[in-house]
Amino acid sequence: MTAPSRLNKAQKVVLAAAFVPMLATGVAGGVGTYSNISGAYGKGTALGAVAAGEGATAVLALVLLGLTMLGQASPLVIRVGLWALPAASSVMSAMAAGDPGRTVIYAVTPMGMCVSAEGMAFLARRIVVHTGGRDAEAERKAAAIVQALAYHRARAANHPDAKVQARSDRTSWKLARKVGVGDVSLGARLVDVQRERVTSGADAALADMFSAPVAPAVTAPVTPAVAPAPPRPELESGADSCDAEDTQVSGCESSDSGPAVTPVTVPVLPPVTLEDVAVVAGVPLPRPGETLTDAQLGVVLRYLRYSDDPPLSYRQAAASFREAGFVGSEKRVRVAWGALLSREENAS
């Protein structure tokens, strides 16, 4: 959704000046139609023709303008009437012409009201989108396309007739091409996603270029095998006193073995868990399915961001957040992510 904003003074002046020639064009079209028809059928008939053509078009234009300013979508019958009524007036005016040159002029004159109405409605719609942040007409079209797409996909999958399934399948692919067309909000969000991907790629590339070399891992020393010492002559005579059943075997072993070597054991640190991060932050353990506080939300995002190397981007962390079953609105998650990145920048 586009963020709402106010019109400044310059914008108001320019838009007001743009409405004036549009309105003047519509009025000129009505006056010209009255003049053309009155010359052939009289003033009474010309007045009725203008009322049925340009007058009805003006009424529909005002209705369209009012609905647009209220932020509501206009019915299809109004949009059709804005073109059908001036077209009928054009045909009637063309029949009143006496030569080919006048026929073209008489036929084009009533279309001034149509263009004027469409122009004012379009400009009013853009003003509403700019100031209110919502495009009701685009939302109506998007909802209709998505609804039709869901219907045809369901019919293509479950309808008993194979021919109907094939037609719905082809129709659903045609509708899929229209999804998101003209949606400014969707385009902005896709640009944000692409910007995050580019940022993550640049971050990974820079980290690979400027990272310090990693020191080799420390391994435990290997104790070499000690060959048995040859029997000494002074102990050969007492060999019978150090048999396998003697309880004083330790004395014999100590006399034959070399110095004892104590192996070095490298401690293996356990992986950091979400509970560890919550304890360090001093917040209760965040649990999936429960409403999280802002502090808990930040703890979860920090844990997910550094659960992989390189750290996850916002899109990846948000996807992991949803997959893990945590609850939080998109707005809160974005705010917490921004606060997390701000703390990282301040710490660096």
Image: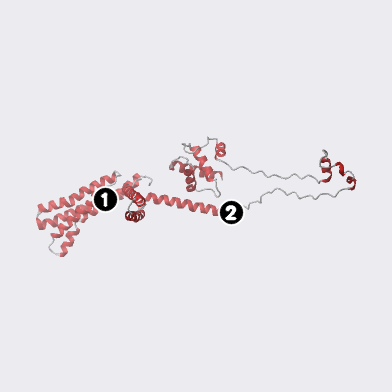
Q: Secondary structure at mark 2?
A: helix
Crowding near the residue tagged with mark 2, few <14, some 14–19, many ≥20 C-alpha atoms within 10 Å: few
**Location of residue 172 in the rendering, given as x and y in whole percent from the top left corner:** 35, 53
User: Is the Cβ of the residue at disc 1 closer than 8 Å to that at disc 2?
Assistant: no
Q: Residue furthest bottom?
A: 100
Mark found first going from the N terminus, 1 or 2: 1
Residue type at tag 1: Met
The residue closer to the viewer here, 163 or 32, is 163
**Location of residue 198 in the rendering, given as x and y in whole percent from the top left corner:** 49, 53
Instruction: From the viewer's perspective, tell me whether residue 142 is left or right of residue 300.
Output: left
**Location of residue 189 in the rendering, given as x and y in whole percent from the top left corner:** 42, 49
Residue at 27 percent of width and 52 percent of height: 119
**Location of residue 19 in the rendering, given as x and y in whole percent from the top left corner:** 26, 50
Check disc 1 and report the residue beneath it.
Answer: 120
Query: Does the rendering let one see residue 162?
Result: yes
Residue at 42 percent of width and 51 percent of height: 190
Check disc 2 and report the residue beneath it.
Answer: 210
Residue at 18 percent of width and 52 percent of height: 54
Q: Secondary structure at mark 1?
A: helix
Q: CA distance from mark 1 to mark 2?
A: 57 Å
Q: How is the image coloured?
A: secondary structure
Instruction: From the viewer's perspective, tell me whether residue 306 is left or right of residue 266.
Output: left
Instruction: From the viewer's perspective, tell me whether residue 296 is left or right of residue 138.
Output: right
Instruction: From the viewer's perspective, tell me whether residue 75 is left or right of residue 45.
Output: right
Front tag of 1 and 2: 2
